[in-house]
Amino acid sequence: MPDANTDGALELAERIRERIARLSHQQLGISASITVSLGVATACQSDLDFKHLYARADQALYQAKARGRNRVETG
């Protein structure tokens, strides 16, 4: 998300999480519910390396899973 700040990225990630959680059994075509955990990381001037940014987002994802899943965390 070029030019997005942390708040904007978190807001979008939360909207995605909520929409997935609200999918009905009819929409999914299965008798189960689906949730998603998301990790968000934003770059600052000193943190423009993609590998470092990706690693922070991945760490945030695992933090979300460890804290109970179906949530958004920042890294």
Image (cartoon, rainbow, N blue to C red):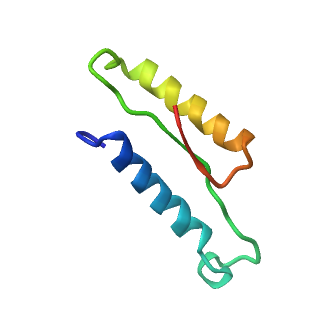
Check the image and name the residue furthest to the bottom.
26
**Residue 43, percent across and down?**
34, 27
Q: Is residue 45 left or right of residue 75?
A: left
Q: Residue at x 67, y 64 (%)?
A: 34
| Quarter occupied by residue 46 | top left
Q: Is residue 57 above or below residue 27?
A: above
Check the image and name the residue furthest to the left.
3
Q: Residue at x 65, y 60 (%)?
A: 35
**Residue 59, percent across and down?**
59, 29
| Quarter occupied by residue 53 | top left
Q: Is residue 61 left or right of residue 52?
A: right
Q: Is residue 56 above or below residue 20?
A: above
**Residue 23, percent across and down?**
59, 75
Q: Is residue 52 above or below residue 60?
A: above
Q: Residue at x 44, y 19 (%)?
A: 51
Count of marks overlaid on the render: 0
Check the image and name the residue furthest to the front.
7
**Residue 1, percent across and down?**
31, 43
| Quarter occupied by residue 4 | top left
Check the image and name the residue furthest to the top.
46
